[in-house]
Image (cartoon, rainbow, N blue to C red):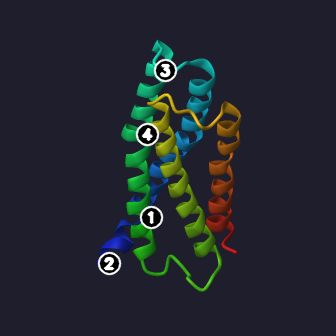
Amino acid sequence: MTDLLTHAYPWIKSLHIMAVISWMAGLFYLPRLFVYHVEQSEPGDSKDLVFQEMERKLLGVIMSPAMIATWVFGLCLVATPGIVDWGSVWPWTKAAAVLGMSWFHGWLGQRRRELTTSDRPVSGRQFRMMNEVPTVLMIVIVLSVVVRF
């Protein structure tokens, strides 16, 4: 299995990067959709239903499969011998940031479920602020992997 991972490494890394890009695109876009949803529609009106459908498809068809693929290919990379030096700080900061991204993904899923009802506990301004979370986490991840501090 180890030899297979070593030979497949460039393919696994490529698939991991593509999955991350897809997941990140959704993590950036979904909170922005929520801003428009909250600010430009009322529960039950035609715009509300359009936003609900867009959000459902973005989360279920693109983001969740991309998150799963990111985790699967990422764990394959971690299992490849010689790739990760667990004595360094960088794999731990990356792991913490990836867990943070996964939490944020779940948080977005909960907000999407709330928006299917008349319950709107998060304002457009709050969604704008939360839209910065994936940016900060992405910075931590990229610096961790590239700089390897």
Q: Quadrant of residue 54?
A: top left
Q: Nearer the viewer, mark 2 or mark 1?
A: 1
- In front here: 17 or 119? 119
Percent coordinates x, y for residue 74 in the rendering: 44, 64
Mark 2: secondary structure: helix
Q: Nearer the viewer, mark 1 or mark 3?
A: 3
Mark 2 vs mark 3: give the one in front.
3
Residue located beneath label 3 in the image: 48
Please provide percent x and percent y for residue 3.
Answer: 32, 78
**From the viewer's perspective, is residue 4 above or below residue 70?**
below
Please tell me which residue is depicted at 48% across the width and 81% down the height of the picture: 82
Q: Which residue is mark 2?
A: 3
Identify the residue at horizontal 37%, vertical 38% (top origin).
61
Q: Position of residue 60 (x, y in %)?
A: 38, 40
Q: Which mark is residue 59?
A: 4
- Crowding at dot 2, Cα within 10 Å, few <14 / some 14-19 / many 20+, comes out as few
Say what amino acid the circle numbered 1 marks: Gly
The tag earlier along the polypeptide, 4 or 3, is: 3
* Residue named by callout 1: 74
Indicate the secondary structure of the residue bearing disc 1.
Answer: helix
Quarter of the image for the C terminus: give it: bottom right
Residue at image x 43%, y 39%?
59
Q: Amino acid at mark 4?
A: Leu
User: From this viewpoint, which residue is outermost toward the top?
Assistant: 46
Asked if the residue at tag 1 contacts the one at tag 2, i.e. Cβ–Cβ closer than 8 Å, the answer is no
Say if mark 4 contacts mark 1, CB within 8 Å: no
Left or right of 39, for residue 21: left
Three-letter amino acid code of the residue under disc 2: Asp
